[in-house]
Image: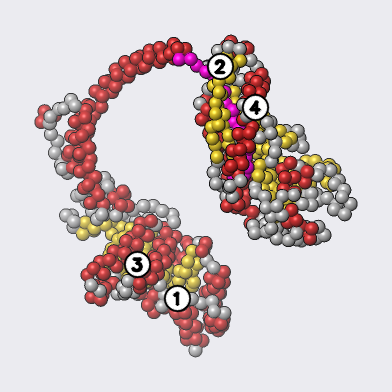
């Protein structure tokens, strides 16, 4: 039972350490003079640890007596003091906390304004750093807040590279100051102190809640000065305490007498020794190193006719925690335990066991009847047999374990067969068509709208001639494993694999409104992966493998083709023919990925694409717009976004026949060195195309 209380305290301390680390993580990017940034940091801390840590308020006090803090309902600002007159009178403002923290200090959020004379450097959580050199992050002594609430604060000193005296005459509105982890840790460089202030009353509530669950009579926390930091009440509803016990003692009497007895046994010295042994040897600048908890002894405490087993724990953390936990548990004698609990437990166990056996036998009989039918059906499924047998022809078994074993064997056979089958049929096709295809009919869907990608792996069929068998198998396995994984991840389906070419389709067996974007992402990811593989193969002396691809969207005719005995699930249509023609254009334009106009219209806000031309492709009389696919918009560089604007202007110039302007734009991109190697072919093509139009 004492372990529950000990665990709750350990979690409280550990969570405080996490909150400290959260602040240290965000501190390097923070302007130490920006009060809004501090409020955002503290508000985020409140949201993260609202249910785990009794944070009363988080704040930051600077060397110039200014202060900014935030709790759940309000944010507080205290202006800097007049350092010339040593007058601490200055304005204090409280603001309502709102969702939009960028406007938290607006006048319409002001709750109250008063003149305050607080000396921030004299507060216990700040004062401990005023004259220290090379201090660590530390817990403050037990103190009362300005509102009279008993509190304790985790204090983080903040140091800067310059001496703080040099900042007194500067304007804080125009002067930005950053935390410097390597700054001298001396009082002259102490810029301020961050505090995470915990409400001691809330810690007492946590102790009380834990004690209720653990069957603890009373528990309290002592610091090294002998002060009671937090304490539970005497839990009168504890089943282990008799009514007589509850009537004899009040919670205050029990705690007071326990404190006196504990102090008389030298527990304070144990707390100090435990803290010194661990805190002085830890280095908090490198982050959390753990919580040190140790049981420091136990004794039996007796008052009147009441006996308690009292367990003592000492605990510290890398930030110099100096606490001792005292837990009092009602003492139960062996005879009393047997009489009160054992007999009733045995009776309950026998009743539950008897009823459970009856229920189990009934359930087993019903399960057996169902399992026999399931076993017969699974055997027919494994044999791919649809013939029905008479009930008298199959043996009945009354052994549940035998039925389950037979069912498991059938399931394993079915899984093995389906595992082999799935390697030949795409999973999307199986999920879509399984159970819905009439073997006596050819299934052909009406026109469906989807996307297709033609991938051409140049020179793949020659790899077997250029490399030995082992290297060829290794390289081709690497290549297709990566390509197939990318296609599957983006919900594509490989329709055909003909020599050097792969035909991949989207939206054929699964409906997706983003099939155009998925197809484009697949092409980009394959290009990136091919670059990695070629780098890897170069170290193994494997030949380089190049690829080109195209993406087009439109209507397809999808379904089964060929004979009734053997079918092939495939797609046909004009959109697929256009994709094939676009892929062939890559060679002339020296590009890798081209997409059609229908695809571009759906992805232009999410992909970086460059206009190429209005081209008449093979077997098409009407020209179509062709675009080069560069990358995703979320990954685009500023240069690529600038290039997009140039190509948009080129597209408009083609529409308005301003061909001389196209030449100027191409020359401008060359002179500004904006082009990549993939773009050189496009730019040269556009330039020559414009020259022909002019001439």
Residue 323 in sight from this viewpoint: no
Mark sitting on residue 263: 4
Q: Quadrant of residue 113?
A: top right
Residue pointed to by mark 3: 454
Q: Which segment is the magenta one? A: 318-334
In this view, the mark in front (1 or 2): 2
- Up-down: is 663 above or below 623? below
Q: Position of residue 178 (x, y in %)?
A: 69, 58
Q: Earlier in the sequence, mark 1 or mark 2?
A: 2
Mark positioned earlier in the residue sequence (4 or 2): 4
Q: Pointer 1 and pointer 3: residues touching (CB < 8 Å)? A: no
Q: Is residue 73 toward the left or the right of residue 1 in the image?
A: right
Q: Earlier in the sequence, mark 2 or mark 3?
A: 2
- The verdict on residue 490 being magenta is no
- Where residue 242 sits in the image (x, y, percent)? 55, 12
Q: 636 or 136: nearer the eye?
A: 136
- Mark 4 or mark 2, whichever is nearer to me: 4
Near-viewer residue (304 or 648): 304
Q: Nearer the viewer, mark 2 or mark 3?
A: 2
Between marks 1 and 3, how big is the CA–CA gap?
Answer: 19 Å
Q: Residues within 10 Å of mark 1 (few under 14, many from 20)?
A: some
> Coloured how?
secondary structure
Contact flag, marks 1 and 2 (Cβ < 8 Å) = no
């Amino acid at each position: 039972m004492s372990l529950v209380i000990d665990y709750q305290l350990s979690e409280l301390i550990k969570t405080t350490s996490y909150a400290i680390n959260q602040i240290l993580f965000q501190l390097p990017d923070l302007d130490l003079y920006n009060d809004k940034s501090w409020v955002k940091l503290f508000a985020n801390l409140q949201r993260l640890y609202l249910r785990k840590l009794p944070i009363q308020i988080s704040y930051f006090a600077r060397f110039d007596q200014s202060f900014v803090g935030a709790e759940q309902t309000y944010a507080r600002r205290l202006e800097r003091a007049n350092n010339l007159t040593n007058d601490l009178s200055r304005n204090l403002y409280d603001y309502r906390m709102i969702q939009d923290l960028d406007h938290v200090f607006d006048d319409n959020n002001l709750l109250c304004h008063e003149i305050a004379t607080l000396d921030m450097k004299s507060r216990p959580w700040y004062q401990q750093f005023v004259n220290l050199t090379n201090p660590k992050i530390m817990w403050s002594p037990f103190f009362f807040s300005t509102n009279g609430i008993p509190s304790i604060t985790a204090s983080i000193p903040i140091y800067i590279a310059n001496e703080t005296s040099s900042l007194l005459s500067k304007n804080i509105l125009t002067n930005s100051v950053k935390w410097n982890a390597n700054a001298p840790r001396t009082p002259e460089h102490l810029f301020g102190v961050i505090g995470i202030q915990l409400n001691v009353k809330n810690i007492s509530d946590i102790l009380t809640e834990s004690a209720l669950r653990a069957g603890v009579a009373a528990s309290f926390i002592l610091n090294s000065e002998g002060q009671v930091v937090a304490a539970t009440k005497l839990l009168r509803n504890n089943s282990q305490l008799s009514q007589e016990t509850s009537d004899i003692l009040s919670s205050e009497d029990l705690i007071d007498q326990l404190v006196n007895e504990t102090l008389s046994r030298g527990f304070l010295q144990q707390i100090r020794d435990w803290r010194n042994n661990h805190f002085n040897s830890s280095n908090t600048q490198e982050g959390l190193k753990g919580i040190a908890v140790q049981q420091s002894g136990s004794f039996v405490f007796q008052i009147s006719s009441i006996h308690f087993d009292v367990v003592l724990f000492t605990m510290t953390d890398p930030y110099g925690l100096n606490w001792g936990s005292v837990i009092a548990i009602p003492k139960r004698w062996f005879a009393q335990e047997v009489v009160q609990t054992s007999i009733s437990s045995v009776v309950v166990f026998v009743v539950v066991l008897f009823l459970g056996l009856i229920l189990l036998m009934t359930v087993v009989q019903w399960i057996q009847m169902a399992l026999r039918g399931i076993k017969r059906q699974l055997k027919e499924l494994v044999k791919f047999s649809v013939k029905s047998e008479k009930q008298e022809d199959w043996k009945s078994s009354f052994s549940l374990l035998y039925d389950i074993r037979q069912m498991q064997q059938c399931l394993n056979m079915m899984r093995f067969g389906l595992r082999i089958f799935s390697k030949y049929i795409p999973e999307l096709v199986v999920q879509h068509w399984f159970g819905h295809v009439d073997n006596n009919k050819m299934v052909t869907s009406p026109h469906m709208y989807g996307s297709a990608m033609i991938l051409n792996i140049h020179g793949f069929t020659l790899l077997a001639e250029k490399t030995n068998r082992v290297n060829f198998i290794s390289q081709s396995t690497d290549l297709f494993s990566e390509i197939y994984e990318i296609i599957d991840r983006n919900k594509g389906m490989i329709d055909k694999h003909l020599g050097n070419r792969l035909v991949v389709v989207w939206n054929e067996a699964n409906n997706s409104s983003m099939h155009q974007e998925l197809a484009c992402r697949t092409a980009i990811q394959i290009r990136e992966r091919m670059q990695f593989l070629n780098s890897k193969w170069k170290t193994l002396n494997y030949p380089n493998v190049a690829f080109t691809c195209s993406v087009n969207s439109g209507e397809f005719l999808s379904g089964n083709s060929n004979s009734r005995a053997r079918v092939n699930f495939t797609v046909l249509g004009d959109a697929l023919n256009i994709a094939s023609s676009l892929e062939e254009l890559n060679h002339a334009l020296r590009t890798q990925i081209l997409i059609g106009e229908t695809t571009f219209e759906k992805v232009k806000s999410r992909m970086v694409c460059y206009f190429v031309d209005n081209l008449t492709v093979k077997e098409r009389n009407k020209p179509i717009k062709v675009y080069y696919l560069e990358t995703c918009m979320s990954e685009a560089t500023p240069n690529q976004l600038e290039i997009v604007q140039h190509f948009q202007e080129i597209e408009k110039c083609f529409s308005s026949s301003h061909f001389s302007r196209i030449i100027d734009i191409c020359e401008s991109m060359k002179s500004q060195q904006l082009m990549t190697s993939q773009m050189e072919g496009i730019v040269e093509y556009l330039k020559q195309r414009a020259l022909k139009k002019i001439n």
